[in-house]
Image: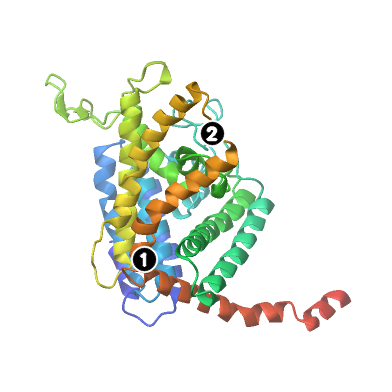
């Protein structure tokens, strides 16, 4: 049923805008109605999971609406639909995540289809499934619609400057080029998130958590990944992977009331649907569970990133470098968590700026060979992305020039 919405526009001559509209309006409306009025009414757990399987399959097919040369649109759909939307729906199967905080169909639609994550509702102010002690950035506000719109405009300008720099400065040192590309990703993802966030906060009364928070100011890896870089995506991963493990929220189903509980690894089968069985004492998960949760979260993130990169490659080769890059972040953060207290006990403490330099250096050391190399040296992905953005900005220049022409200012002065 869902594929019928996507398939008609795959092999047609429709414009990119028309195909984007087909996905986000037609397909988005269908899965929104289906999820809100059908899936959400079902018991949490196995039954919901079975009913969302068509959504998950179609979300993967949605990116095929765009060919490999239309890489910006293809990337946006892979990120927003294939990854974030699918993970939000999966979290809803466990009564977790942003969809469970929606008040009414309008908010549910925005939280489902847009790359945003709501500020957590206080325990007395509404439903929330996250443990109070595991806050992350879920209790922080991204700001007013005006502030979000200003950030969006700044990131549009910054991305344009980065693209021009990468096109013009061909012989940049590798580290400088990597840092420019990192700022480019920061701008692109921020554009996808801050624009929709400014709209929904204005018209739907939703309060949104920050999308980024000056990632270059990170003083450690935990600060970078947990509080500053792509906070929306990390929050979705948190509620779907990390919190499930640290909460000991087992998913259960009962074969018969008198029969014994079946245990599949960490998932005991007890009730007619998946239920939360928190066994965390004093709201503090054990160090082992936190370690497993951290590593599992990064591995799932690595798989999602690797899948997106694979979908962007015409050759169809899986190189596993992005998966490796994200998978090693978990053990590195665990090592950091052990080293920093050890240093503090011995009076060894870095000043903030040296800590920031060290953090960015460690990230660049791994990203240089495992994150940027696959898109710059192993494939032409980075080149295609940069050229596409450059062409898009160049095509916008005449419109911007017309908008700010003397004729326009004269008409404004007369009005």
Answer with the quarter of the image where residue 76 lies: bottom left
Q: Indicate the colouring scheme.
A: rainbow
Q: Is residue 79 above or below residue 301?
A: below
Instruction: Judge from the rendering whether residue 4 lies leftward or rightward of residue 386; answer left or right.
Output: left
Mark 1, residue position? 375
Expressed as whole percent of the image width and height from the top left, the position of residue 188 reads 51, 62
Instruction: Judge from the rendering whether residue 60 lies leftward or rightward of residue 231; answer left or right.
Output: left
Q: Is residue 80 above or below residue 411?
A: above
What's the residue at 46%, 76% (across, down)? 387
Q: Who is closer to the viewer here, 359 or 16?
A: 359
Any part of residue 50 in sight: yes
Between discs 1 and 2, the one toward the N terminus = 2
Any part of residue 231 in sight: no
The N terminus is located in which quarter? bottom left
Q: Who is closer to the viewer here, 366 or 248?
A: 366
Q: CA distance from mark 1 to mark 2?
A: 40 Å
Q: How many marks?
A: 2
Residue that protrudes farthest toward the right in the picture = 414
The C terminus is located in which quarter? bottom right
Instruction: Answer few, some or many: residues within 10 Å of disc 2's Cα (few below 14, many 20 plus, some between 14 and 19).
Output: some
What's the residue at 23%, 26% (across, down)? 271
Expressed as whole percent of the image width and height from the top left, the position of residue 128 reads 47, 32
Instruction: Answer few, some or many: residues within 10 Å of disc 1's Cα (few below 14, many 20 plus, some between 14 and 19).
Output: some
Mark 1 and mark 2 residues within 8 Å of each other at the beta carbon: no
What's the residue at 30%, 45% (across, down)? 299
Mark 2, residue position? 121
Q: Who is closer to the viewer here, 97 or 280?
A: 280
Which secondary structure lies at badge 1?
Answer: helix
Q: Which mark is residue 226?
A: none
* Foreground label between 1 and 2: 1
Expressed as whole percent of the image width and height from the top left, the position of residue 281 reads 37, 16
What's the residue at 57%, 55% (across, down)? 194
């Amino acid at each position: 049923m869902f594929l019928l919405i996507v398939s008609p526009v795959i092999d047609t001559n429709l414009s990119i805008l028309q195909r984007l509209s087909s996905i986000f309006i037609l397909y988005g409306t269908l899965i929104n109605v289906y999820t809100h009025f059908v899936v959400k009414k079902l018991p949490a757990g196995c039954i919901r999971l079975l009913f969302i399987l068509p959504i998950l399959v179609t979300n993967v097919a949605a990116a095929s609406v765009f060919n490999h040369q239309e890489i910006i649109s293809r990337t946006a759909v892979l990120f927003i639909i294939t990854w974030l939307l699918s993970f939000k729906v999966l979290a809803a199967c466990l009564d977790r995540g942003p969809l469970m905080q929606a008040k009414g169909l309008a908010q549910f639609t925005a939280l489902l289809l847009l790359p945003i994550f709501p500020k957590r509702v206080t325990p007395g102010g509404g439903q929330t499934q996250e443990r109070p002690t595991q806050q992350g950035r879920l209790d922080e506000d991204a700001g007013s619609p005006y502030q979000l719109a200003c950030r969006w405009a700044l990131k549009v300008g910054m991305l344009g400057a980065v693209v021009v720099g990468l096109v013009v400065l061909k012989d940049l040192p590798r580290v400088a080029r990597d840092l420019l590309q990192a700022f480019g990703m920061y701008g692109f993802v921020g554009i996808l998130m801050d624009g929709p966030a400014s709209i929904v906060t204005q018209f739907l009364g939703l309060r949104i958590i920050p999308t980024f928070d000056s990632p270059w100011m990170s003083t450690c890896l935990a600060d970078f990944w947990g509080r500053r870089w792509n906070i929306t995506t990390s929050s979705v991963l948190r509620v779907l992977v990390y919190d499930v493990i640290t909460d000991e929220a087992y998913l259960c189903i009962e074969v018969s009331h008198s029969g014994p509980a079946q245990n599949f690894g960490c998932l005991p089968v007890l009730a007619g649907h998946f239920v939360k069985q928190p066994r965390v004492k004093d709201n503090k998960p054990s160090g082992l569970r936190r370690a497993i949760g951290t590593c599992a979260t990064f591995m799932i993130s690595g798989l999602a990133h690797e899948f997106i990169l694979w979908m962007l490659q015409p050759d169809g080769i899986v190189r596993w470098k992005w998966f490796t890059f994200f998978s090693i972040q978990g053990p590195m953060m665990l090592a950091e968590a052990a080293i920093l207290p050890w240093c503090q006990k011995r009076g060894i403490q870095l000043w903030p700026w040296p800590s920031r330099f060290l953090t960015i250096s460690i990230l660049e050391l791994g990203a240089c060979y495992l994150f940027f190399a696959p898109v710059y040296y192993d494939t032409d992905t980075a080149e295609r992305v940069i050229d596409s953005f450059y062409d898009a900005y160049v095509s916008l220049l005449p419109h911007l020039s017309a908008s700010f022409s003397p004729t326009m200012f004269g008409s404004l002065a007369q009005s």
